Image: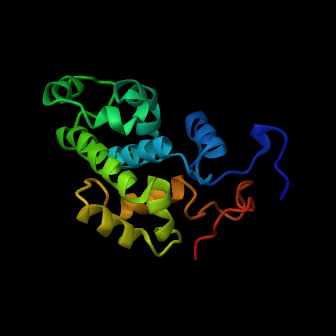
Amino acid sequence: MTKPTKTADRKRCHWAKGALESRYHDREWGDPVRDDRKLFEMLILEGAQAGLSWSTILAKRDRYREVFAQFEPAVVARFTPARVERLLADPGIVRNRLKVAGTVRNAKHFLEVQREFGSFAKYLRGFAGSKKADALSLDLKKRGFTFVGPTIMYAFMQAVGMVNDHERSCWKWNNGLVRSA
């Protein structure tokens, strides 16, 4: 399928309604990600989204990048309890103690996975495909991660191109990604 030349002419997945969602859909959602920093960002943002709308997270994303050191896991892993407290006062992010503290905790475990596998991207290779969200969730939980339930992990897998759940009518459907079953 040829991409329409004008962004406004593109048929998108039903959820990409607003400008922010459309831009995210067109530029990122479902595109394969192999960069560990980007994988860490998406892991954290998908966990932050739990119980909220994705548009809320997209609207706060720039602030998340700013306060979480551009999602450099080695930096975030060193955040102190005092820094977590300061973050909880920041209206630019989701001010949920478990989610903010979980970001620091997940950064530490993310680094452990990188040491074990060489990269987080290499670790994820064993979980590609639509039936693997439960297994990924279970393994991450065993490793100490938080906010990594099966639903969150499936959304993460969609976001980073491990499965392709673009609608068949979407201009991004036929772009060579792994297809979900």
**Where residue 70 appears, x then y in whole percent?**
43, 30
Comparing 148 with 34, the one in front is 34
Comparing 70 with 2, the one in front is 70
Snapshot quadrant of residue 123: bottom left
Residue at horizontal 83 percent and vertical 46 percent from the top: 4
Considering only vertical position in the picture, is 87 above or below 49?
above
On screen, residue 106 versus residue 84, left or right, reads right
The mark tally for this picture is 0
**Where residue 15 appears, x then y in whole percent?**
56, 51
**Where residue 101 appears, x then y in whole percent?**
20, 40
On screen, residue 6 versus residue 159, left or right, reads right
Residue at horizontal 34 percent and vertical 47 percent from the top: 111
Camera sees residue 51? no
The N terminus: image quadrant: bottom right
Snapshot quadrant of residue 107: top left
The C terminus: image quadrant: bottom right
Q: How is the image coloured?
A: rainbow
On screen, residue 98 versus residue 11, left or right, reads left
Residue at horizontal 59 percent and vertical 63 percent from the top: 165
Residue at horizontal 85 percent and vertical 53 percent from the top: 2
Camera sees residue 9? yes
Considering only vertical position in the picture, is 126 above or below 65?
below
